[in-house]
Amino acid sequence: MTETTTVQVNRVYIKATPQAVWDAITQPEWTQKYGYSGLADFDLKRGGKHRTKPTQEFIDAGFTSDLLEGEVLEVEPPRKLKITWKLLMDPGLTSEPYTTITYDIEETQTAGTRLTVTHDVTGAPNHAALVSGEREDINAGPGENAGGGWAWVLSDLKSVLETGKSIAA
């Protein structure tokens, strides 16, 4: 039996430079400001590890270990980052295989920077449901609704880079 490939593609245009978008994806001082607010820790080289550590808010809510982890597959700052990725916060997710995310960051002539996130969630139906925004019952952290998925995370990233404020603020 052949498994069907499941790939989700999300795109957003951000009034920011490609370097600013890159930094917002890879630097903990940025990643704590949007989305689910973890602290990114990247070893930005092929084969390097990455993880997201909990903020104090997560720790206070009982999440004391890494929130997600993976490996860097491709890195071309500030244009492309490809990683494996697995959320560690829910048993239904930790039992699934690693998924693959590709961030493509392109400067446009008229619309700032185009960020395309391609997430291959083949063989990981719980991850697929979470990142699509379909599942709201996965524990995403302190006071968070997991149902927003990539659309919510990328909207929040755009808001933080363009206005300095999270959409949840």
Image (cartoon, grey):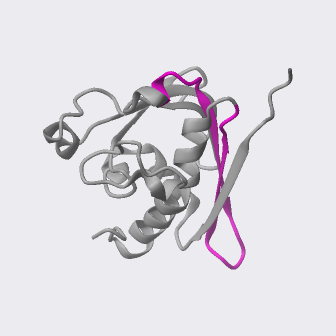
Q: Is residue 63 visible?
A: yes
Q: Nearer the viewer, residue 154 or 126?
A: 126
The number of callouts visible is 0
Q: Is residue 111 magenta?
A: yes
When the figure is inspected, residue 109 is found, relative to residue 7, above or below; the finding is below
**Residue at (32%, 71%) from the top-left corner?**
165
**69 lies left or right of 127:** left
Residue at 59% x, 23% y: name it.
97
The residue drawn where x is 65% and y is 76% is 111
Residue 152 position in % (x across, y down): 48, 62
Q: Quadrant of residue 102?
A: top right
| Magenta region includes residue 35 | no
Estimate the x, y position of residue 120 in percent, counting from the top left: 69, 38
7 and 82: which is toward the camera: 7
Q: Position of residue 6 (x, y in %)?
A: 74, 40
Relative horizontal placement of residue 121, taking residue 44 as reference (left or right): right
Residue 29's x, y, as percent?
A: 31, 49
Q: Using the image, determine if residue 93 lies above or below residue 158.
A: above
Magenta residues (range): 93-122
* Quarter of the image that includes the C terminus: bottom left
Residue sitting nearer the eye, 149 or 91: 91
Looking at this rendering, what residue extends furthest in the bottom direction? 110
Residue occupying the point 86% across, 20% down: 1
